[in-house]
Image (tube, rainbow, N blue to C red):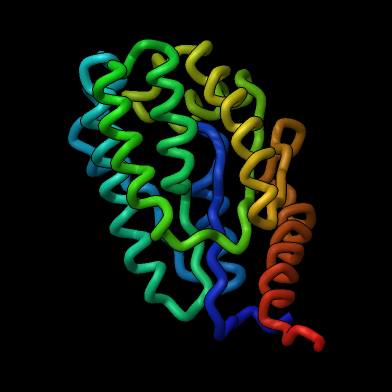
Amino acid sequence: MNKQQSSRFFTVIAGNIGVGKTTFTRYLCSELQWYPFYENFAENPYLKNFYNDMPRWAFQSQVFFLKERLKDLEKISRLTTPCVQDRSIFEDAEIFARNLYEREMMSPTDHRVYHDLYKRISSFLPRPDLLIYLRASTWTLISRIRKRGRKFEQDINTEYLMQLNNLYDKWVREFSQHCETLIIDTDEVKMYENKAWLDGIIGEIGKQAEKKKAPKSK
């Protein structure tokens, strides 16, 4: 397969905190020479405070990520080459903001304002051609979060991650009705130590892009 693509193909890497989205995005883009859009967590001025006091900072943190995701989508809408987004705006609203609201860590007023903003702009957003869902159990996520060592993540609540996983599984089932979806279970695989397995996944993703490029028969 020719790794260099010449037409637009928009892929989203979805998955819970610590599952390995950024590393997978980096490897995928390196192998297929696609353009990456990484999650801008490092510049979120509310994130550290959010993990210390979720009810106080949930709305501000979510609005920051919404704003950053919209900036990326504006660029993605103008691209004519394949690109990969590390987490989507849909996950922000349908999983993370929803989870905060359901756990009473975001007030009904804040959630209503946030979700109304999201709904009003979502119909104008470019939709991915392929959704890749990296899935892992809660205990695998905790192990990976501890291993990567971001200080502000070390005290993430187990129940919080578990509820996010439940919402992810439900959301992916619904979203897959409208978008090609590839689900990758990562519990039993050391993804970045098994190059043959990983290259097989990359090959499947490349085939999806080639399929979209192929002219439709009349």
| Vertical placement of residue 12 versus 15, above or below | below
- Viewed as shown, does residue 127 lie left or right of 47? right
Residue 104's spot in the image, x, y percent? 36, 11
Residue 197's spot in the image, x, y percent? 78, 53
- Viewed as shown, does residue 216 lie left or right of 58? right
Q: Nearer the viewer, residue 189 or 173?
A: 173
Q: Residue at 40% across / 67% down in the picture?
A: 76
Residue 29's spot in the image, x, y percent? 54, 65
| Location of residue 166 (image quadrant) | top right
Q: Nearer the viewer, residue 215 or 38?
A: 215
| Location of residue 109 (image quadrant) | top left
| Location of residue 9 (image quadrant) | bottom right
**Quadrant into which the N terminus falls:** bottom right
- Viewed as shown, does residue 10 lie left or right of 58? right
Q: How many marks?
A: 0
Q: Nearer the viewer, residue 204 or 77?
A: 77
Q: Residue at 40% across / 53% down in the picture?
A: 38
| Vertical placement of residue 127 versus 54, above or below | below
| Vertical placement of residue 88 versus 142, above or below | below
Q: Residue at 73% across / 61% down in the picture?
A: 199
Q: Residue furthest left?
A: 45
**Quadrant into which the C terminus falls:** bottom right
Q: Nearer the viewer, residue 46 or 94?
A: 94
- Viewed as shown, does residue 97 lie left or right of 5? left
Residue 56's spot in the image, x, y percent? 21, 16
Q: Residue at 71% across / 51% down in the picture?
A: 182
